Amino acid sequence: MKKVMVIYGTRPEAIKVAPLILALREDPDFEPIAVSTGQHKEMLEQVHKVFNFRPDYDLAVFEQGQSLNKLAGKVFLALDKLFAEVHPDLVLVQGDTTTVSVAAQAAFYAQIPVAHLEAGLRSGDIHSPFPEEANRRIATQVSELHLAPSQSSVDNLLREGIDPEKIALTGNTVIDALIMASKLELKYQDPHLERIMNSEVPMVLVTCHRRENWHKLEQIGLALRELAETYPAMQFLFPVHGNPMLRQALVPHIEHCENVYVCEPLPYEFFAAALKKAHIVLSDSGGVQEEAPALKTPVLCMRNSTERPSAVQAGGVKLVGTDKDFIVSSFRELIDDPAVYLSMTTGANPYGDGTAAIKSIEAIKSLLEIG
Ligand code: UDP
């Protein structure tokens, strides 16, 4: 049995590695070892519960307000010790957080092959998104296997001179996760959320968390307020990211609006259901740009650029930046012009058919010369 150490630290990473961990568990050739760095503590717990797995090791490096360098230092030291104890045959990382770049480098220094899930995303600007674009490129440099979610990611890797033999086009495991979550029964603990979800009133789902948007939070807050006041017959649902700074900066702008419900981060199966029900999603999230088009829900993405151009090209995602007036006018256009709305709900889903975990395992077997 080959030991595959899957290292993750944030909510989106946990969601995207979950289908792979579950599939590795079912495969007699593998012993999956789940390692959480605990970068997003409470939100990770939600994901573990939904997908019914626990980390075998929790490095517990989380500390409120710590610098990226402090986080990186702790992850390096903890993994150095863990690699010496466990001797994995392969380290797998997903995405582009600090956990990913550090874990990939740590494995490289320990001469353990690295597989990078969701490889090849590029914005083209090393400073944006910060620090994710740099993290992705670092992970690419030290990886032996690049599991690319879309053809545009494959093309990015080829352009950078990565050996085509080391690239596998898998689709994105987030679609696998979405399919799994959609089969779960929803037992509401929150009666207000249950009312919103069962109501005929059109719902707008909002998320906002990106570090490069932290100095734009006032514009975003003001845009949300104007939209909520302009469309009193719509219900806005805003699960606020676990970072308390975001809550402090955004919530005061909208807390007086009766049609805005601000709540804690939703467990994944509830969020997936809200994504499906939503009339429009307003978000700066990466994962949401992949999930919402698969559910035919239009996304107004509050960013100026994206490393997920396939979703924009397919029509399901529109970049609206972080300027209040542009966010509001883009939203208005979507409500006022049915043809624009239709054009955002009929495109293809560029991120696969829910078989990304299986395809990733096939590529890992080939790398480790199994079978
Ligand atoms: N998500 C969730 N609950 C929420 C908000 C988001 O489970 O209340 C999920 C969402 O479906 C997606 C992931 O979290 O899979 C996205 O996380 P986030 O936006 O924090 O990170 P990003 O994808 O931008 O890296």
Image (cartoon, helix red, strand yellow):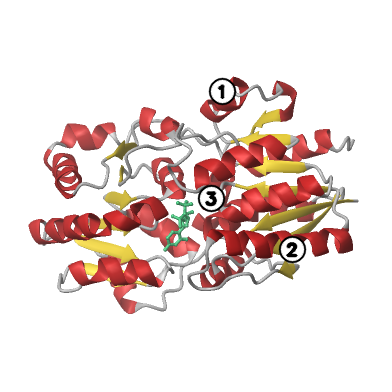
Q: Position of residue 203 (x, y in %)?
A: 25, 58
Residue at numbered disc 3? 179
Q: Quadrant of residue 61?
A: bottom right
Residue type, label 3: Ile
Question: Viewer-nearest of labels 2 and 1?
Answer: 2
Q: Is residue 145 left or right of residue 350?
A: right
Which of 155/345 is in front? 155
Q: Position of residue 300 (x, y in %)?
A: 29, 44
**Dots 3, 1 in contact, CB < 8 A:** no
Q: Position of residue 332 (x, y in %)?
A: 13, 44
Residue at numbered disc 1? 155
Above or below, 264 against 9 in this view is below
Mark 1 neighbour density, 10 Å: few (under 14) some (14–19) many (20 or more): some
Residue at numbered disc 2? 77
Residue type, label 1: Asp
Circle number at residue 208: none
Mark 3 neighbour density, 10 Å: few (under 14) some (14–19) many (20 or more): some
Q: Is residue 19 left or right of residue 83?
A: left
Picture residue at 59% right of the left edge, 58% below the top: 14
State whether residue 27 appears in this view. Answer: yes
**Of pointers 2 and 1, the one earlier in the residue sequence:** 2
Question: Viewer-nearest of labels 2 and 3?
Answer: 2
Q: Quadrant of residue 200?
A: bottom left
**Of pointers 2 and 3, the one earlier in the residue sequence:** 2
Q: Position of residue 112 (x, y in %)?
A: 83, 46
Which of 257/82 is in front? 82
Above or below, 247 against 166 in this view is below
Above or below, 167 against 97 in this view is above
